[in-house]
Image (cartoon, rainbow, N blue to C red):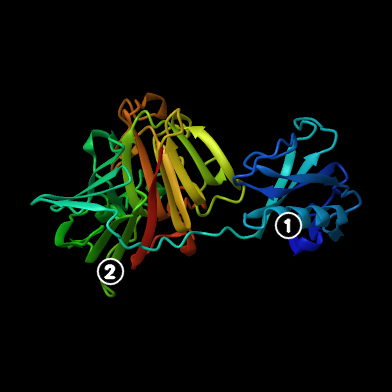
Amino acid sequence: MKDVDLKAGKFEIYNENFFKTLDDLQLDWFVGGAGGHHHDNPGRPAGMTFGHGGTIDISGIQPQQRKVITSEEMQKVIERVLGHHGDNEIFVSFYFKSKNGEPLIDKGQVMAKQQFCINDYKYPTLTVETNNGQCSKEETNTYVKLSAAGTDLYIGKWNGWIDYLTVDGKDMLQFRESIVPEFWRAPTDNDYGAQFQDRFAAWKNPEMKVKDFKTNDNSVVATIEMPKQKATLTMTYTLTPDGQVIVREQLQTEKDAKTSEMFRFGMSIQMPKQYDMVEYYGRGPIETYCDRKDSEFLGIYKNKVNDEYFEYVRPQESGNHFDVRWFSVIDQNGQGLQFYSNAPMEASALPYTTAQLDDGPHKDKAWGHHSGDLIPSGMTSVHIQQRQLGLGCVNSWGAWPRDEYRVKYKDYDFTFAIKPLK
């Protein structure tokens, strides 16, 4: 399909078949979005919270033929939705469904689909606010504590990480695990085929040394050396007056250094296991990656953390979500943490740690290395990242993902916010 002028109800269909028409299909469309408005519409697709739709007759499109269709009904619905929800991201989604069914195909089964955005999402700027006396600070030889609006944030001076995070006295980090930078993922079958577990090994457990540590009224800046990677990592933590934590992760690399690429660039958070639900605005509900995403439409989805992991035969990376606007990890009462950025990001939450899913340098075949043998870690492992390496999938014996889907050795600058949900 091609957007000719969707706001005017005009689009193009290309019948890629060589020998059959599209007469056995009907085209359902839906104009809407995902936001604070909830309409009880029985035909509303998963992920959408408001909008309206209809059906278009597409019979008569011959094999290898293109046809431009104009729908006045769609145009009127688009005008109405944009008029009522102009501040929201608005989509036009198309679903090609079987009219009558046939062997192995149910009536109404979706055979193809596509989603277009006609009104863009408005990302927050994440500007650093001045303290204005609303944030208190406590400093010792080993840590700095920032407090505001019920949020207590502890940053260690010796490691430069967030060591403790509490909201109204509740621990948000399990086992006092720090929030740490993350460059590694549990290798996939394709990663092993391309020997990424060896090629990218420098990023698995990189040596990091705090070079400088500065504080002001409501922020901390830690400068960290990564000698083997020939890079410098600068972590900036700011506590806003309303209790949100803004994290800025900056990687500065040496121009001529011979350092490998990495699996991802982001942060890892270990939360208590009672935060066992995710709700997010991004592509879903199935896992998506930068080179495997178009099949899943943007929308708001909710799921159990235990169901976010797909049980591949062998444990490996799983559960990622691409084009994320915000990502919440919550308990049964809707309390927890929400993560969002000033640009599209990637995120996941799993009942297993990366170490549990990592088969090591040689794809260990020992007992216990099947997904069915995994035992939940007792915490929720959250991954918030600017970018993760694509899956490749050209073959599983050496092909790399395409160039635009790789995480090259270069400078990165990633900012995201941690918002308490009370």
**How many numbered marks appear?**
2
Residue furthest to the front in view is 133
How would you rate the neighbour count of disc 1 (Cα within 10 Å): few for under 14, some for 14-19, many for 20 or more? Answer: few
The quarter of the picture where the C terminus appears is top left
Residue drawn at (68%, 44%), measured in percent from left and top? 50
Residue under the image location 68 percent in, 56 percent down: 116
Q: Amino acid at mark 1?
A: Gly
The earlier-in-sequence mark between 1 and 2 is 1
Q: Which residue is mark 1?
A: 83
263 w.r.t. 3: above or below: above
> Which amino acid is tagged 2?
Thr
> At numbered mark 2, what does the secondary structure look like: helix, strand or loop?
strand
Q: Is residue 14 left or right of residue 193?
A: right
| Farthest-out residue, right | 60
Q: Residue 83 or 384: which is nearer the viewer? A: 83
Q: Quadrant of residue 210?
A: bottom left
At mark 1, the secondary structure is: helix
Q: Which mark is residue 223?
A: none
Q: Residues within 10 Å of mark 2 (few under 14, many from 20)?
A: some
- Seen in the image, is 332 located left or right of residue 27? left
Which residue has dot 2 on it?
253
Classify residue 177 by image quadrant. top left
